[in-house]
Amino acid sequence: MTAVAPKSVARTGDVSTKAGTTLPAGTDSGAWTPGAVTVTTTDLLTSDGRKVVVEATCDFSFTGKSGNTAVTNSSTVKLKPGSRSLNAGGIAPLVDGDSNQDSYGNTVSVSSDALLQTD
């Protein structure tokens, strides 16, 4: 059995977003903009004095054009943890490297150097 290298848990402030570059169908110009990241934390677990994040969500908005017609769109990207050895009250934390994206390339990801680690 191959050992899995431990990864740092996500804490508040460790989740970021990246706007996608794929245009919605029927549009010929425009841009995606990320909204604020909403994180769900657990009160049962902290690392380095910050709460551990167990889920993250971001609403992205699109403003563009199809010819001379204004077009708007939106997409929500939710990041949930996979199965982990460590959990708090039955809930696993997000960890460094976790990422999710929609079909437009809008991305929510974790970058963490927390001392608390799990597989």
Image (tube, rainbow, N blue to C red):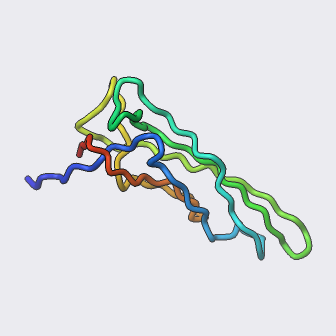
Look at 17% across and 52% down and name the residue there.
Answer: 4
Look at 59% across and 47% down and name the residue there.
Answer: 58
On screen, residue 66 versus residue 6, left or right, reads: right
* 3 vs 38: above or below: below
The image shows a total of numbered marks equal to: 0
Look at 55% across and 56% down and name the residue there.
Answer: 17
Looking at the image, can residue 16 be seen? yes
Q: Relative to the observer, which residue lies in front, 91 or 95?
A: 95
Image x and y of residue 35, in percent = 66, 50
On screen, residue 106 versus residue 28, left or right, reads: left
Look at 57% across and 50% down and name the residue there.
Answer: 77
On screen, residue 41 versus residue 59, left or right, reads: left
On screen, residue 21 versus residue 110, left or right, reads: right
* 100 vs 9: above or below: below
* 66 vs 117: above or below: below
Looking at the image, can residue 92 be seen? no
Image x and y of residue 119, in percent = 23, 46
Residue situated furthest right in the rendering: 68
Q: Relative to the observer, which residue lies in front, 60 or 24?
A: 60
Residue situated furthest left in the rendering: 1
* 60 vs 103: above or below: above
Residue situated furthest front in the rendering: 49
Image x and y of residue 60, in percent = 66, 54
